[in-house]
Amino acid sequence: MTGSVRSVLLLLLFAFSANSQAAGRHPNILVILADDLGYGSAGCYGADGKLLRTPGMDRLAREGRRFADANATSSVCSPTRYSVLTGRYCWRTSLKKGVLGVFSPLHVERERLTLATLAKRNGYRTAAVGKWHLGYGDGKGSLLFQTDYAAELSPGPLDLGFDYHFSVPANHGDITGVFIENRFVYGLRKGRIPKGMTIPGPDPDDENYQATYTATDLENKRAASRILDLDAPRRKNPRVMATLTDKAIRWIETQPEEKPFFLFLTPVAVHNPITPDRDLAEGSAAGLYGDWIHELDRSVERMLDALDRLDRSRNTLVIFTSDNGGVFKPYRESLQTEAYKAGLKINGPFRGGKHSVWEGGFRVPFLVRWPGHVPAGTVCSDMVSLSDILATLAAVLGHPLPRAAEVAEDSYNQLPAFLGKGIAPAREDMIVHSSDGVFAIRRGPWKWIEGVPAAGVKRGALKIRAAEHKPQLYNLVEDPAETRDVSADHPKVAAGLKALLGRYRRGGYSRELPPPMPPEVAAPIPPLPPLTGQVVLRESLTAASKAPWAAISGTWAAQDSGQWGTAVNAKRPATLRGPLPITDGTLQYELSFGRADRHSLRIHAAGEGNRSFRVTVWPTRLDIAKNPEKGETAPTFLARYALELKNKTWYTLRITFVGDTITTQCGGVTATAKHAIFAEPKERMFLQWYDGDGGLRSVVVTR
């Protein structure tokens, strides 16, 4: 978009906003962010009415505007949720792949502008109800931090501008099995509760809750042993959607008419496990997955009906969308696969789905209704990113944003598209990012996929999504299903998009074009000082292992001036055993990642009891832990540090023991920990590669 067009557009928008404010017409705002709802899973987006019915979503399309090219920023949930709230791509943070864990600290920076703080600054009451999955608590930089659900969950959403919060903390079917209200587990009866405080909870006979939570309630049944032991009412999966919708409606009912509200409603549907309520089960020809979509749509209908009943529909801006595309893995038996076989095109005409870098992972329904402002029954084909919601709502409120380098770095104002003003599209390009950390950039008809997964992606994912892990170019106008890579036919287009992606990444923002910057060059890792002390062991590992060394498991072969081990499978590592005749001293060797998930150095103390500890090196982190002894069930983690290692590159790993202190150095990172076991005489070491292959060489031990 040219500078002159942008200037005219800004003048028009601020005139619109000023007029709205003068008339006292700040709208209520309801943003509904569904979970895993694919582009083709609603009637208004082409779903066959014989398979499922979505009258709530269809009503929004009929009374508002349907967007045909709306996109999640990531093909998984946590990163997109971060982008929606902040207007910033999540890959600019420490989360480079996948999603946050159940025990992750709050991922949104407290000083950052969010949808909620934007609304509060403009006189709104604010609430977040539904799936959260953005963490609780302050890790203070410690990678060992774990959220304590038996204590106050601060900082959290109330520190990001929300006045009220009621949530499923991570995922439907997660191991917490509880709801969160404001800063505590809802109905928590025992825990680290401030003296004199009673935590609100449901009535004892409330049928929406249950006393126990077991493997049958989990998304991952194998995680049953990890279900949190909390003395609190437990979620009942078929009633979670109804409970969240009830909470959202009751909150709206309590809001004064003279004050606008902003509600961020995030249903758990249609994420696994698929648990429609009993009255909806077996009502869809697409099976239980279709029923689950019906459950989501019923929530939408109830919200719209509540606005009608409270006479607030006319002055409420409603945005409905999804955090990523739908689950589409037809090679695997699932309820989604059953729906697909029944004829449901979960992600419409697009290739792939959740997790992938294909369009099916990003294209999502996007419906906007604002009576009297958004033209009813219309369709917009402008490219929209979910990161654009923040800048768009800022325009609605007449709230100028600072420069792109400061806030909302990747958020474009889509208000003209909402209003159907017929002005040039706000976006000329857009970045998307897969679960594996693969970048893609779109501009005009083109989509270029960089094809480089982030460090630490598991071997299984690399195998399943191998087709995504190479550079490729598609013309989405001619080939929306991404069936033909045309990079060989258009090398200049591919090169231009590659350069633009690099410029946006290095520049730190994309709402404006950053100035040219030099290519990214990794800073050299400073060499470690020379080893000191008496050398008591030296082994090059350039040839097959000989006594006292022994290959215990996996396959080992001489390669690249070292020994390369390949694990038997994901659970059985390639293991090389060697002596370690020191108490105080230093162990040093070089390692190189191939396809392995991690390298583990397990060291056994001398004497009886088989007592041991380990240093684990991942491409993205380094752990130090004492292994469990007899009667113990879990390791004791003593240190965890962030790390960034590249594949097929040799790195020095040095471990130094002085008394009860261990110091580990690798990749420019120094990690320390203390424990009595480190002061004991060492006897032997086991060098292991898990879930793939890796190399070892140049072992030296001094004392």
Image (tube, helix red, strand yellow):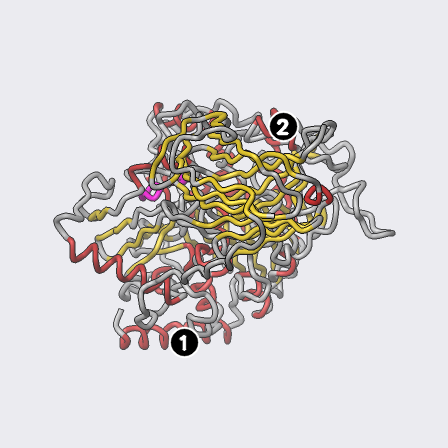
Q: Residue furthest left?
A: 489
Asked whether residue 120 appears in the rendered view, the answer is: yes
Relative height, residue 692 to residue 10 (above, below): above
Left or right position of 522 against 407: left
Q: Which residue is mark 2?
A: 224
Q: Residue at x 57, y 26 (%)?
A: 221
| Number of the front mark, 2 or 1 | 2
Q: Which residue is mark 1?
A: 15
Left or right position of 557 against 588: left
- Out of 67 and 696, give the one closest to the viewer: 696
Residue 311 falls inside the magenta stretch: no
- Out of 377 and 327, give the one closest to the viewer: 327
Q: Which amino acid is tagged 2?
A: Ala
Q: Position of residue 654 (x, y in %)?
A: 53, 50
Number of residues whose C-alpha sits closer than 10 Å to that of mark 2, classed few (under 14), some (14–19) or many (20 or more)? some
Image quadrant assignment for residue 341 = top left
Range covered by the magenta-colored residues: 354-360
Q: Residue at x 83, y 51 (%)?
A: 197
Q: Secondary structure at mark 1?
A: helix
Q: Identify the main secondary structure in magenta.
A: loop
Number of residues whose C-alpha sits closer than 10 Å to that of mark 1, classed few (under 14), some (14–19) or many (20 or more)? few
The disc, 2 or 1, on the residue closer to the chain's N-terminal end is 1
Q: How many marks?
A: 2
Q: Which amino acid is tagged 1?
A: Ala
Q: Which mark is residue 244?
A: none
Q: Position of residue 20 (x, y in %)?
A: 47, 71
Q: Position of residue 690 (x, y in %)?
A: 48, 34
